[in-house]
């Protein structure tokens, strides 16, 4: 699917001034920082990172969700920021005033002349501006999102009390977020495999024991 002629990628950037500097937002799995090592994903399917690649194949007009994503970054929505690599967030305390996106073409780096590995994993060239700088209260942006029914739902003035089940699920999510998704899925898979294998061995042992007991009873009788 990718690699022939380079890999196009949309890079989201934030800044507190239109003059810059512009700082890049990093995702967990897709290419961004050229020096960041590649990340193992299987069997996890990083859907947001994957959709970002699809967005790079056309324009934001055909991918209105990406402007919704950028708008929610400007709003500092935690549920959205959690889908990105917050440990490398360029604005960990408060969101920037402006946000934009650029389209780059990525290529793998080659070995140095002495066959040593270069520091960077990727080389990239800027293709064009993918979406212009916007603010969270940009009139055109809000009209665009409203047209596509992508405006964030207003927060209730008073938060309803959470049930015990909701509180438990929130705590599970907090714990799960501390583990890399591929490692979490592999851990669950190996745990399930161990349980099934152990159950099968115990069942087989029980059948052998029952067969021996039946044979002893038959000889006595």
Image (cartoon, grey):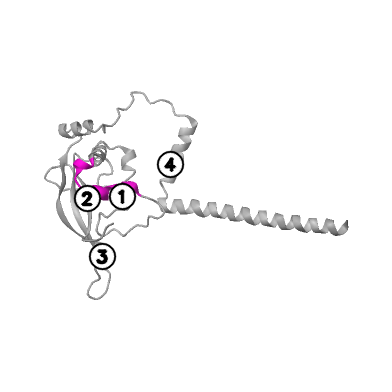
Distance from label 3 to label 2 (Cα)?
A: 28 Å
The number of callouts visible is: 4
Quarter that holds the N terminus: bottom left
Check disc 1 and report its element: helix, strand or loop.
helix
Dividing the picture into quadrants, the one containing residue 2 is: bottom left
Question: What is the C-alpha distance between the residues marked 4 and 3?
Answer: 35 Å
Q: Which residue is mark 1?
A: 50
The boundaries of the magenta stretch are 46-63
Q: Which residue is mark 2?
A: 57
Q: Is residue 213 magenta?
A: no
Q: Position of residue 41 (x, y in %)?
A: 37, 55
The quarter of the rendered structure image containing the C terminus is bottom right
Alpha carbon of mark 3 to alpha carbon of mark 1: how far? 25 Å
For residue 139, side relative to residue 178 (left or right)? left
Q: Give how far apart the Cα atoms at labels 4 and 2 are.
A: 33 Å
Q: Residue furthest bottom?
A: 114
Judged from the image, the secondary structure of the residue bearing numbered disc 4 is: helix
State the separation of the CA atoms marked 1 and 4: 22 Å
Q: Residues within 10 Å of mark 1 (few under 14, many from 20)?
A: few
């Amino acid at each position: 699917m990718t690699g022939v002629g380079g890999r196009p990628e949309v890079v989201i950037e934030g800044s507190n001034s239109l003059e810059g500097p512009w700082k890049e937002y990093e995702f967990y799995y897709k290419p961004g920082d050229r020096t960041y090592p590649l990340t193992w994903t299987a069997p996890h399917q990083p859907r947001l990172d994957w959709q970002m690649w699809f967005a790079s194949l056309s324009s934001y007009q055909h991918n209105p969700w990406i402007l919704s994503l950028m708008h929610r970054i400007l709003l500092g929505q935690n549920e959205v920021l959690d889908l990105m690599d917050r440990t490398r967030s360029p604005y960990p305390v408060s969101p920037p005033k402006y946000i934009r996106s650029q389209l780059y073409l990525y290529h793998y780096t080659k070995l140095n002349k002495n066959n040593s590995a270069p520091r960077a994993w990727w080389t990239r060239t800027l293709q064009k501006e993918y979406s212009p700088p916007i603010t969270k209260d940009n009139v055109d942006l809000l009209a665009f999102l409203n047209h596509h029914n992508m405006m964030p739902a207003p927060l209730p003035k008073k938060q309803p009390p959470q049930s015990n089940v909701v509180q438990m699920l929130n705590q599970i999510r907090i714990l799960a977020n501390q583990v890399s998704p591929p490692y979490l899925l592999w851990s669950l898979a190996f745990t399930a495999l161990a349980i099934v294998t152990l159950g099968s061995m115990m069942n087989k042992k029980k059948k052998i024991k029952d067969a021996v007991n039946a044979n002893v009873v038959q000889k006595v009788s």
